[in-house]
Amino acid sequence: MKHKGLATLLGAVGVVGLTWGVGTAVDAHGSHPPSAAEIQFAKETSDLMTNTVVAALVQEIGETTPSNVAQGNQSISLIFNDRNHDMRLVGRLSPLRHNDYPEDRFERDALDDAMSGTPRTSVERVNGQWTYRRSIPLSNFAPQCKMCHSNFAALSSSAWVGALMLRIPIGDD
């Protein structure tokens, strides 16, 4: 009976050790930067996402009229939901909602760049997950922009007003 207890204890220690070893191996893999192929996959995903999001914005702008500005505002706000941190519109011109401000150093630097029309990309860890990050400068390019953003009225149509921020997970962390 004494040997059975020892065998059980050794078995439990072995399971804990194996679990720790697998966890350490997974964590060690996750701590290494992603491969060039993984980054390229994330970039291509970002390109597709950019096209989709820009198409939605252009569609919304094209359908916005003085009589449906409130509906257009709500529609685009639902697309750029405050709970979605992977696809956000970020700016500096009030009025801004909580989710419209930069969340971290990448977004602060990217917004600085966007205000002069310069895009930015980066590969970095966000909350422990490797990500491909991208910012796309946005301008006050259509008259309809001023319908929803009255604060844009004094700006030229080429004025940079903020950025579209995208965050694409890389790999399987």
Image (cartoon, helix red, strand yellow):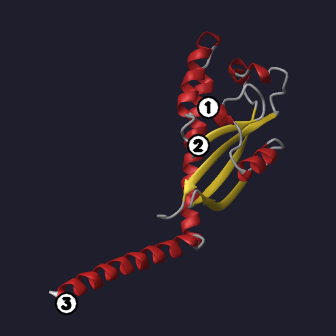
How many numbered badges does the structure rendering display?
3
The reply, left or right, for residue 144 in relation to residue 40 is right
* Foreground label between 1 and 2: 2
Q: Above or below — where is 16 with respect to 101?
A: below
Q: Above or below — where is 104 with respect to 32?
A: above
Q: Earlier in the sequence, mark 1 or mark 2?
A: 1
Where residue 130 appears, x then y in whole percent?
Answer: 57, 62
Residue sitting farthest toward the bottom? 3
Q: Residue visible at 62% across and 16% down?
A: 69
Residue that badge 1 annotates? 58
Q: Residue visible at 59% across and 59% down?
A: 131
Q: Earlier in the sequence, mark 3 or mark 1?
A: 3
- The reply to whether dot 3 and dot 2 touch (C-beta < 8 Å) is no
The amino acid type found where label 1 is placed reads Val
Residue that badge 2 annotates? 87
The reply, left or right, for residue 45 in relation to residue 151 is left
Q: Which quadrant, please, contains the N terminus? A: bottom left
Q: Residue visible at 64% across and 36% down?
A: 99
Residue that badge 3 annotates? 3
Mark pair 3, 2: CA separation = 59 Å
* Foreground label between 3 and 1: 3
The reply, left or right, for residue 149 in relation to residue 14 is right
Mark pair 1, 2: CA separation = 16 Å
Q: Circle 1 sits in a helix, a strand or a loop, which is it?
A: helix
Quarter of the image holding residue 65? top right
